[in-house]
Amino acid sequence: MKIAVEGCAHGELEKIYDLVESIQQREGYQIDLLICCGDFQSTRNLEDLQCMAVPKKHLDICTFYNGEKVAPVLTIFIGGNHEASNYLQELPYGGWVAPNIYYLGYAGVVNVKGVRIGGISGIYKGHDYLKGRFEFSPFNESTKRSVYHIRQLDVFRLKQLSPKVDILLSHDWPRGITDFGNKNQLLRFKPHFREDIEDNKLGSPPCEDLLMTLRPPYWFAAHLHCKFSALVQHDEGESTKFLALDKCLPKRRFLQVLEIETAEEGKAELKYDLEWLTILSLTNHLISIKGINGYMPGEGGSERFNFTPTEEEKNAILERFQNDLRIPQNFTRIAEPYNPSAGTDFDLIEQPKAFINPQTTEFCNKLNLDDPLQLAMLMTGHSLNTSTYVDQGPTPNTSATSPERNEDEVPLEDSNSSDDEPTTHFLSRAPLASVLPKPKWRQDSTSDLSSTLDDSSLSTSNRSVLSLPTPKKEGSASENFAIDELNLSSPKVACPAVDEPPQAEKKGESEDKPPMKKFKRRNEAIYAKEDSE
């Protein structure tokens, strides 16, 4: 099975899918699955944007939710720290956010052609780690951020898995992972990491715990906006190939294609993981919706602390699903999609109330689970809100291009965008089929895609990290993308060379540019006379 892994998506789905299509055409093979490692930004409308923890000038609608286009590749993703948190909260155990796009939930495991893929959403913050899931929309500025902080229950559940998963996803890097790769190369690209690395503060302690406990063959991450690879050797000859990828920007290494042996043939489709379903059922009583610290059961206590399920427990769950673990195609639009022709002023939009998602209700009823969102609302005296929206199908898009999006907790300085751009609060977006704008760093719009591609470098299936999101198409502005080789099956892992920044303006180029306009002060003679006196 060929899998494309992407770092931080930041809503750039069209560019990512265009690149995947370009790879398939050039290579002559089909990519079965796309995995995104967070900052997916699955916004549905302007109300969802109000629930994202990002500066206003980086808010943008970029989604397949309205049905105008359908994701061409089966896609699964985890949440990061820049998400439509109110929407993802509706799906704590995972679910479809759009046709063919599946969210893994706070933590989750699915099965694709016999390959077990697990993931944990969000980032680690110690002051929230031991708390329950007490947040729900509308958020204040504090809960808008704490809602995407990972919780100990999700880590505890993942640690019950046995045998291990094949692929594990996180937005954060595991703490200490830099000790297993080319640290010096990383520091040349990200010198401000040095202090955190030396203090052993770079990365997530819970992810480090999961890495050493589960020992997955592959671990993919994002968040820090750079590419970094490592090989972690465990006991008994086991190893984990770790790869962190960049965000979707020109000349950045954000996509990796690899091939994994599978036990099943045929088309890739999502199935529930039986062991994970059983763990969810066995640990339902541990759910907390309190904003205070709590603790998981452990050795020495009177209650059960090992929830790795027995065969009898798994068979009981399998019976509830009538021996059919296929994830149903039950996506339903419960919020009105964004309509750019409405011309709504973003400053007048408020955060929406929290809604109950029918996908979660169906899943919880089948497994006899509690929905933490429902619990949090009921325990604080709020009524449960059920959507009255009637899905009327795809919504056309007819407006102009929107501004770039960016990060909150990760510094913006590594972006190719300008911080001096004026802030706009009136959001609009071009049709999905429209020509994408030329990247700002690029001065040559006539470049040829084939000029930077070496056909020999495209001969292997698990090597290509491609760095420009939009392949060249006839009649459209296009840019080059470079291919960076990394063989994940190789025991020798090194961080590849860092892409050079765009070249500065060459000497002599200024001669071809129009002269700088000089401004003359009004009534200059009068002021000059006064100064002389």
Image (cartoon, rainbow, N blue to C red):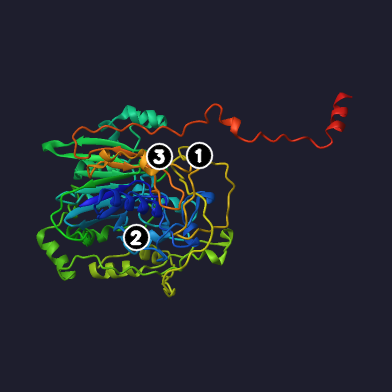
The alpha-carbon separation of the residues under discs 2 and 1 comes to: 31 Å
Q: Position of residue 148 (x, y in %)?
A: 39, 51
The alpha-carbon separation of the residues under discs 3 and 2 comes to: 24 Å
Q: Which residue is mark 3?
A: 251
Residue furthest right as drawn: 533
Q: Which residue is mark 1?
A: 443
- The nearer-to-camera label among 2 and 1 is 1
Q: Which residue is mark 2?
A: 71
Q: Amino acid at mark 1?
A: Gln
Looking at marks 3 and 1 on the same chain, the residue that comes earlier in the sequence is marked by 3
Q: Secondary structure at mark 3?
A: loop
Q: Secondary structure at mark 1?
A: loop
Q: Is residue 179 above or below residue 146?
A: above
Q: Is residue 421 above or below residue 181?
A: below
In the picture, measured across the screen, residue 215 lies left or right of residue 119, that is left
Q: Position of residue 84 (x, y in %)?
A: 43, 57
Q: Locate the C terminus and report the quarter of the image it occupies.
A: top right
Q: Amino acid at mark 2?
A: Ala
The alpha-carbon separation of the residues under discs 3 and 1 comes to: 14 Å
In the image shown, does 6 or 129 lie closer to the viewer? Answer: 6
The quadrant in which residue 363 appears is: bottom left
The quadrant in which residue 312 appears is: bottom left
Q: Amino acid at mark 3?
A: Lys
In the image shown, does 41 or 282 lie closer to the viewer? Answer: 41
Q: Position of residue 26 (x, y in %)?
A: 29, 48
The reply to whether the C-beta atoms of the residues labelled 2 and 1 are less than 8 Å apart is no
In the picture, measured across the screen, residue 525 lies left or right of residue 131, that is right
Residue sitting at x 27%, y 65%: 369
Looking at marks 2 and 1 on the same chain, the residue that comes earlier in the sequence is marked by 2
Numbered circles on residues, count = 3
